[in-house]
Amino acid sequence: GLKIVTIGGGSSYTPEIVEGFIRRYEELPVRELWLVDIEAGKEKLEIISNLAKRMVRKAGVPISIYTTLDRREALPNADFVTTQFRIGSLDARIKDERIPLRHGYIGQETNGAGGMFKALRTIPVMLEIDQDMAELCPDAWLINFTNPSGMVTEAVLRYGKTKKIIGLCNVPIGMEMGVAKLFDVDSNRIRIDFAGLNHMVFGLSAYLDGNDITKSVIDKIADGKMESTVKNIMNIDWVPEFAAGLSIIPCPYHRYYFKRQEMLEKELEEFSKGETRAEIVKNLENDLFQLYKDPALDSKPPQLEQRGGAYYSDAACRLISSIYNDKGDIQPVDTRNNGALAGISPDSVVEVSCVITKNGPRPLTMGELPIEINGLVQQIKSFERVVIDAAVTGDYNKALLAMTINPLVSSDTMAKVLLDEMLEAHQKDLPQF
Ligand code: NAD
Ligand code: G6P
Ligand code: MN
């Protein structure tokens, strides 16, 4: 049987992954699930583990649930470690969203100034987890959800010991589900060739039962028929001629770059009413934990679908299963480019369709990205690499460089204002600065 360790086990998302393991029990015999959290998350961890125990009992599968506040107790002999933690909790996210907005800039969990600060807080902790794994479970796979997922994954590949880390996101799965809905078919009949970066990924082609349907998907997008596929991103239609001209499938996050003004106005409107997405999520989370506490509840409640990360566990469980069962199927993940995308250096992490075997992901060759998007993807990758270097070194000038070259900031003066204010606000979670 398999031993799984989930770091950030107190997350309100955990019932999803528990359900995923239960549903796949036949092909993926998980015997132990260790949920790891920290002192501040102790109460949530208790509630989650009790719910998880009720879920496995009801399903009648022999998965034992353990909890600990010491990850070193959980890690020995793990087969897979999944990470889904948030340094500084939602209060830190509130600052990441509010500070930029106060200065008239996009305030977002994984993009712009907010995404950069989430990376600065997270990367040092992820490198400590990498150290512990090298010592306690050197052969385990590390499946990373912790955002910004692409940057965190690249930081470990560049500066950590494990080469067995894979980053994941629910956006590609959501896009396949969105296309399936357009054609009113089951999503396992849809395949999209993905290429780009995390939250900067494009669908280059789409297939229904293996037949190329890209053109009609683009027509439907231009007709405004494909809504944002994640709950955390507001749905504003693309200009039809833009969608047609682009002629590949954008992800919901592209709205921050190709509709920057409209997205900022929407965000500022919500902000003036007093709520950013982080605060909405805080309320959602409160409601979810009230439900989870109910001793009669023994399954994942549908309310969890209000979170942007809905269905993330499908991505996690099918990836783990394909590695364990050496399936050789195709899945989009965040992994070392190795030449799949011609315009990105081979040692950088990209989000790309891969063949998944027991040796992990092997990216499919995608060649050159269309010229009209290639530059933006490269620019974001430059930003990511400078952020990673800043996170590892604590170098102020590097941090300022990163902030300035981000397309959602683009001003050295304003980058310094944001940087100084955010360094101050997050001081306790940024020991390297
Ligand atoms: P959350 O605020 O509920 O945090 C999850 C848990 O992490 C909390 O219980 C917290 O106590 C714990 N934690 C904090 N620091 C820790 C540490 N050092 N070690 C162990 N546990 C720690 O967050 P959430 O909303 O459940 O999201 C969790 C993470 O997953 C975030 O980073 C979020 O951005 C990410 N996420 C990613 C995707 C994706 O597409 N990749 C989807 C959804 C969420
Ligand atoms: C999805 C993304 C995640 C992101 C999350 C936010 O869009 O793929 O990476 O963190 O949703 O959801 P939330 O409900 O926390 O705003
Ligand atoms: Mn994501």
Image: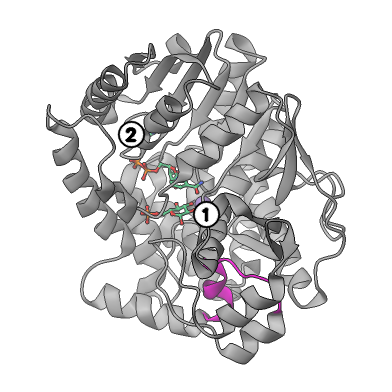
Q: Is residue 392 above or below residue 98?
A: above
Earlier-in-chain disc, 1 versus 2 = 2
- Left of 83 or right of it: where is 40? left
Identify the residue at image location x=62%, y=47%.
151
Q: Amino acid at mark 1?
A: Asp
**Picture layout, residue 144 above or below residue 251:** above
What residue type is disc 2 on? Pro
Query: In the displayed structure, does residue 196 sit left or right of residue 275?
Result: right
- The structure residue drawn at horizontal position 68% and vertical position 56%, both measured from the top left corner, is 209
Crowd around label 1: few <14 · some 14–19 · many ≥20 (10 Å): few
In the image, taking residue 97 as reference, residue 192 lies left or right, namely right
Q: Position of residue 3 (x, y in %)?
A: 50, 14
Tag 2 residue:
15
Spot occupied by residue 423 in the image (x, y as percentages of width and height): 45, 53
- The residue identified by callout 1 is 186
Q: Is residue 211 left or right of residue 318?
A: right
Q: Is mark 2 within 8 Å of ligand 1?
A: no
Residue 211 pos. (x, y %): 74, 62
Q: Nearer the viewer, residue 337 or 359?
A: 359
Q: Pick whichever, 369 or 87, lies toward us.
A: 369
Camera sees residue 190: yes
Where residue 343 sits, quadrant-wise, is bottom right
Q: Position of residue 335 (x, y in %)?
A: 71, 42
Residue 258 is one of the magenta-drawn residues: yes
In the rendered structure, which segment of residues is drawn in magenta? 247-259
Badge 2, how many Cα within 10 Å: few under 14, some, many 20+? many
Helix, strand or loop at label 1? It is loop
Residue at disc 2, secondary structure: helix
